[in-house]
Image (spheres, grey):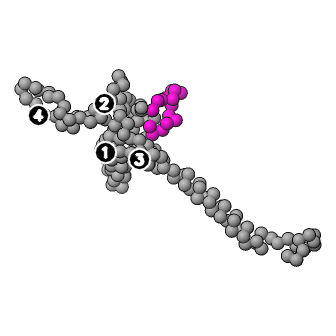
Amino acid sequence: MKNRRNPDWPRPSLADRPGRIGFVVTLLFLGFVFLVCSAIAAFALDFSKPVLTLEGTPMTVCLERPAPTPEAPRPQCARSVPLTVGRVIATVLLSPSDEKAPDVVEVARRGDLARKIYQGTEPVELAAEDIAYVKRHLAKLGPLLASQVLPLLDPGHAVNGVKTETVP
């Protein structure tokens, strides 16, 4: 490139500019990485939220109940814990499959996912594919539980055109 102002001098092609080729290739690669990462995005969900009764009080699960006696045929619970969204989802995932011969890989996946959700005391990162998998199994829940779990998994969920509230 002796004289840039000379119109007769041929301009170098893109192939003659290795610095620009590298820049273009890098931009294309970063764009591809961004698309792949956004496709397998993970969402942090808080499964420690309590499940509420129709009155708005937290539901509890009895972990320890004394043996019945003639004086107390149905004794009060000795130790209970709040029922959380994580416990509900783990119970659904650990329940027996409706299939007659379930795939062992599918059963193991359900167990791993249930353990990950149940043990999560902080927000748990779930891939979009795992959230969709859990949503497919929510039909086993009753309407009271499903109406509180579904908005957590899918915040944009609407029932009959009315957006549902998330669990407080």
Residue nearer the viewer, 125 or 136:
125
Q: Residues within 10 Å of mark 3 (few under 14, many from 20)?
A: some
What residue is drawn where x is 7% and y is 24%?
71
The magenta stretch is: 152-166
Whether residue 153 is visible, yes or no, is yes
Q: Residue at x 48, y 29 (%)?
A: 164
Classify residue 38 as left or right of residue 44. Answer: right
Residue 6 in picture, x, y percent from top left = 93, 71
User: How busy is the neighbourhood of tag 2: few (under 14 within 10 Å), some, or many (20 plus)?
Assistant: some
Whichever of callouts 3 and 4 sits on the residue coming sooner in the sequence is 4
Look at the numbered discs 2 and 4 and tell me whether their residues touch, using CB distance below 8 Å: no
Taking 69 as reference, is 26 left or right? right
C-alpha gap between disc 1 and disc 2: 20 Å
Which is more N-terminal, label 2 or label 3?
2
Residue that mark 2 sits on: 59
Q: Quadrant of the C terminus?
A: top left
Residue corresponding to mark 4: 67
The crowd level at tag 4 (other Cα within 10 Å; few <14, some 14-19, many 20+) is few
Earlier sequence position, callout 2 versus callout 4: 2
**Spatial separation of the CA atoms under disc 2 and disc 4:** 23 Å
Q: Is residue 78 above or below residue 27?
A: above
Disc 1: which residue: 94
Image quadrant assignment for residue 3: bottom right
Q: Earlier in the sequence, mark 1 or mark 2?
A: 2
Q: Answer yes or no: do the residues labelled 1 and 2 have beta carbons within 8 Å?
A: no
